[in-house]
Image: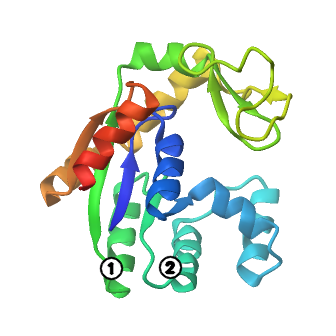
């Protein structure tokens, strides 16, 4: 089963994608991770990505679809989680066409619904282990009292520079303008399912598991 995790920045898409990879053996395809990997790969596609990113330009949809197709070809028979893609209606059409070419189906689109004000409060409280990337939150998952990451034992933690209220509200507005139309798009296709994105991590995971069966 291939799924899309849909929701505003900070809704917990990455966290739930990691749980699904651990529990179901699915492969998480995060646009940001793929671009960073491609940039340092030295391949022809990677060189194109590096040149565009180094010039401060946006990578085209065509290139992102190309990177996704590479992952599909490298992992035949695998189940994928699309995290952060698609973001627009043209990207949704392109992804649908790509899956069809590969004889693959989209099992579900899971919308992680949130309350904007609660989301702002949660995101401005989050931090990450600088060593392994494990996520923490001052409210729901604070850094352990001994100051050590539960996953790797690291002692350095960072906060994203754009995890502040002004920046987050700008990112939310961008999401509502460009990405929220996908909710209606996938609802019309009969693919859309919803969960409460602001629940505890394990509660949200249980909801997703129940939806996927």
Give residue 173's quadrant in the image: top left
Expressed as whole percent of the image width and height from the top left, the position of residue 188 reads 13, 54
Query: Mark 2 and mark 1: span between their CA atoms?
Result: 10 Å
Q: What residue is pinned by disc 2?
A: 72
Residue 104 got which mark?
A: 1
Q: How many marks?
A: 2
Contact check, label 2 and label 1, Cβ < 8 Å = yes
Query: Is residue 51 placed above or below 4 in the rendered structure?
Result: below
Q: Is residue 21 left or right of residue 167?
A: left
The residue lying at 52 percent from left, 79 percent from top is 69
Q: Is residue 150 left or right of residue 165?
A: right
Q: Is residue 164 left or right of residue 174?
A: right
The answer to whether any part of residue 98 appears in the image is yes
The answer to whether any part of residue 185 appears in the image is no
Instruction: Tell me which label, 2 or 1, sits earlier in the chain.
Output: 2
Residue neighbourhood size for the residue with mark 1, other residues' Cα within 10 Å, grouped as few (<14), some (14–19), many (≥20): some
The residue lying at 53 percent from left, 55 percent from top is 22
- Quadrant where the C terminus is found in the figure: bottom left
Query: Is residue 158 placed above or below 103 in the rendered structure?
Result: above
The residue lying at 38 percent from left, 71 percent from top is 94
Residue neighbourhood size for the residue with mark 2, other residues' Cα within 10 Å, grouped as few (<14), some (14–19), many (≥20): many
Expressed as whole percent of the image width and height from the top left, the position of residue 185 reads 22, 53
């Amino acid at each position: 089963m291939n799924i899309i995790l849909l929701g505003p920045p900070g809704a917990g898409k990455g966290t739930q994608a990691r749980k699904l990879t651990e529990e179901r053996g699915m492969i998480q395809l995060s646009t940001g991770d793929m671009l960073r990997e491609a940039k340092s790969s030295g391949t022809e596609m990677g060189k194109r990505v590096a040149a565009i990113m180094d010039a401060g330009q946006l990578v085209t949809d065509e290139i992102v679809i190309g990177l996704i197709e590479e992952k599909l070809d490298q992992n035949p028979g695998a189940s994928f989680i699309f995290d952060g893609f698609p973001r627009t209606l043209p990207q949704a059409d392109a992804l649908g066409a790509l899956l069809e070419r590969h004889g693959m189906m989209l099992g579900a689109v899971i919308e992680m619904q949130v309350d904007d004000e609660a989301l702002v409060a949660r995101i401005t409280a989050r931090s990450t282990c600088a060593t392994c990337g494990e996520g923490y939150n001052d409210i729901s998952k604070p850094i352990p009292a001994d100051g050590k990451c539960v996953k790797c034992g690291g002692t350095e933690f960072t906060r994203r520079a754009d995890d502040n209220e002004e920046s987050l509200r700008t990112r939310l507005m961008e999401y509502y303008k460009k990405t929220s139309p996908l909710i209606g798009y996938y609802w019309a296709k009969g693919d859309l399912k919803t969960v409460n994105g602001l629940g505890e991590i394990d509660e949200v995971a249980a909801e997703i598991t129940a939806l996927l069966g």
